Image: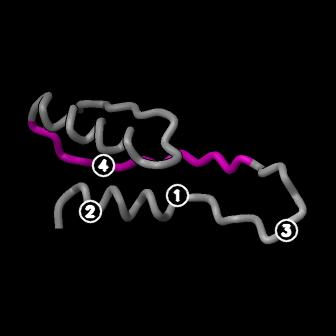
Amino acid sequence: MGIFNHLSDVAELCECPPFSHGHSKLRKKHLQTVEIEVKMDCEGCERKVRKSVEGMKGVTGVEVDPK
């Protein structure tokens, strides 16, 4: 199982559940910050992880801290 499988599992956990009331047209935005620790050895790894996470549904921003 690679890093991209783990990231897609996290994305599924972060999605907001649908409203149970059919009459409401307005949806409340549920904002959530998720921190994922990934070992990255080079800028190419950083770029792959960033692009993968940015492509996930609901992601509005990605910060990478290469420690």
Please say whether residue 15 is one of the residues in the magenta stretch: no
The CA span between labels 3 and 1 is 21 Å
Along the line of sight, which residue is nearer the eye, 24 or 43?
24
Q: Does the residue at mark 2 contact the one at mark 4 (Cβ under 8 Å)? A: no
Disc 3 is placed on an element classified as loop
Tag 2 secondary structure: helix
The mark nearer the N terminus, 3 or 4, is: 3
Q: Which residues are magenta?
A: 29-41
Q: Earlier in the sequence, mark 2 or mark 3?
A: 2
Mark nearer the viewer, 3 or 1: 3
Q: Are marks 2 and 3 in contact (CB under 8 Å)?
A: no
Image position, residue 31 (x, y; %) = 64, 46
Dividing the image into 4 quarters, which one contains the N terminus?
bottom left
**Where does label 3 land, which residue?**
21
**Amino acid marked by disc 2:** Asn
Question: In the image, which disc is placed on residue 5?
Answer: 2
* Residue 9 image offset from top left, x and y in percent: 37, 64
What residue did someone put label 1 on? 14
Mark 4 is on which residue type?
A: Glu
- Foreground disc of the pair 3, 4: 3
Q: Which residue is mark 4?
A: 37
Looking at the picture, which amino acid does disc 1 mark?
Answer: Cys
Q: Residues within 10 Å of mark 1 (few under 14, many from 20)?
A: some
